[in-house]
Image (cartoon, rainbow, N blue to C red):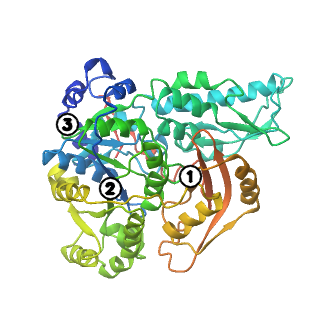
Amino acid sequence: MEDIEIARNAKLKNINEITSKLGIPEDEVEPYGKYKAKISINYLKQFEDRKNGKLILVTAINPTPLGEGKTTTSIGLSDGLNRINKKSVLVLREPSLGPVFGIKGGATGGGHSQVAPMEDINLHFTGDIHAITSANNLLSAMIDNHIFQGNELGFDKVVWKRCVDLNDRALRKVEIGLSGEKNMSPREDSFDITVASEIMAIFCLATSIKDLKRRLGNIIVGYTKESKPITCHDLKAEGSLTVLLKDALNPNIVQTLENNPAIIHGGPFANIAHGCNSILATKMALKLGDYVVTEAGFGADLGAEKFLDIKCRNLGKSPDAVVIVATLRALKYHGGVAKEDVNVKNTEAIKEGIHNLLKHVENIRKYGLNPIVAINKFTSDTEEELDVLKKLLEGKVEYSLLENWAKGGEGAIDLAEKVVNICEKEKDFKPIYELSGSIREKIETIAKEIYGATGITYSEQAIYDLEKIEKLAKNMPVCIAKTQYSFSDDPKNLLCEEPFNINVTSIEIKNGAEFIVVKAGKIMTMPGLPKNPAAEKIDIDENGNIIGIF
């Protein structure tokens, strides 16, 4: 049975039953139909002194085009914890329409470990990402209107980009202002995908409406001839942007197929942004549950690193356990097997691919945290291959075999029990770098310690950017944008056996998000569609049922 059929046949409960199970008063909940709702952020103030639950971070080895099931694992683990009578709340990111209609399809889990209503979550949901798109583009309109009306602030260069939440490579570079109107100044512009925009990052890192407005006002949108930064506050735009985002800032709550609570809020990519759900959603879950399961995008070199070095600094809490998801298929792929052959038995490739997994294990330990490997089992896996993997992990890291895709929470009970034990162990969390270091030092630390690079090379543009930003940015973390498929910045260099450098092409200050984006390799902030996008298979039948989202 396909994921969408499983989801459609599930018996969902009215969202009020889910929120009441968490003890949330009705007047703090705004339903969006029967099965989804928003929780007022004002509710957080009522239990600020309540003790936080345990935080469990789910990450993975470097992803493959096949998918490793990180979200599926997160959902299964939360269901598994509830099955062993632990009050668990799941916290995830909102799916972007880009991958839904692009290469990936849906992002709400799979099999019997899904969040629902899956079609709503994968499409417009409660409109949060649309609100972020509108706020972003209102700021663009105000910039160009200001220039048209006389340019009192003295814009010489505009650095703020427009955005849309779709994969559209034709918008990577555009010409605007071509109407020929008097005072209209044509210029080159470009679009980011919404989930890579600074407003998405701000949205996910803000701790209140007041903090959101402050951060929005601090966005640098351009520079004068004297290289003086011009901000959103200079344009008097932060108030209007905050108004567009005020409802979106309230976290969304839905349910798993086993009727357990799932908070889904915010959706930055991890390869080109910081890859974590909102601070507000995580804080709310930590007050509502005894165990909180969350995930960070792509592999641990991207999402987990940014979670630990960026989000934890803002959240004020570090994970009590870290789950690293791996599959036999992914290990074979990282061991040099072609995508079309990963379902064929190959124990030697597993022995090669294990190096990728163990590097991620080593990296998590560098933060003073305790990892466990979750082996996401597929029907193509053989017992011989599983035995080889278990022997490779024995004595190196604790592991658990997962079967929640087929069995739901029952198939994740072993992982749940082991995670509970890990949460009671001592930890000595410490970010991988100090904020007081230089931008170069932070980049070098991540590249060498987390990626395993030999060194860093900087383009002329990156050196120019660095000199300008060093004068503006003090004590900010860095957010490296690179390919998700490899520890290197080359998506084809899977084995990373030869010494490699990280090639920095440009650097940008995100003054509102309060971090610095470092672009490496050929990374794009506006993805393109594949040759055969998922959009070709998505349809709706005569009864109004959506088909093709997987």
Which amino acid type is shown beneath numbered disc 1?
Pro
Q: Nearer the viewer, residue 1 or 423?
A: 423
Pointer 1: residues within 10 angstroms few (<14), some, or many (20+)?
many
217 relative to 258, above or below: above
Dot 3 falls on a residue whose secondary structure is loop
Left or right: 363 in relation to 502:
left
Can residue 54 be spotted in the picture? yes
Q: Nearer the viewer, residue 419 or 343?
A: 419
Which amino acid type is shown beneath numbered disc 2?
Gly
Q: Are marks 1 and 2 in contact (CB under 8 Å)?
A: no
Which residue is located at x 75 percent, y 55 percent? Answer: 467
The residues tagged by marks 1 and 2 sit, at their Cα atoms, a distance apart of 29 Å
Which amino acid type is shown beneath numbered disc 3?
Asn
Which residue is located at x 59 percent, y 55 percent? Answer: 436
Q: Nearer the viewer, residue 441 or 61?
A: 441
The residues tagged by marks 3 and 1 sit, at their Cα atoms, a distance apart of 38 Å
| Residue 259: image tag | 3
Which residue is located at x 17 percent, y 34 percent? Answer: 11
176 relative to 384, above or below: above
Q: Are marks 3 and 1 in contact (CB under 8 Å)?
A: no
- Residue 529 percent location from the top left of the image: 53, 49
**Callout count:** 3
| Residue 477: image tag | 1
Q: Are marks 3 and 2 in contact (CB under 8 Å)?
A: no
- Residue 297 percent location from the top left of the image: 43, 52
| Residue 69: image tag | 2
Q: Nearer the viewer, residue 338 or 32?
A: 32
Lower position in the chain sequence, tag 3 or tag 1: 3
Lower position in the chain sequence, tag 1 or tag 2: 2
Dot 2 falls on a residue whose secondary structure is loop
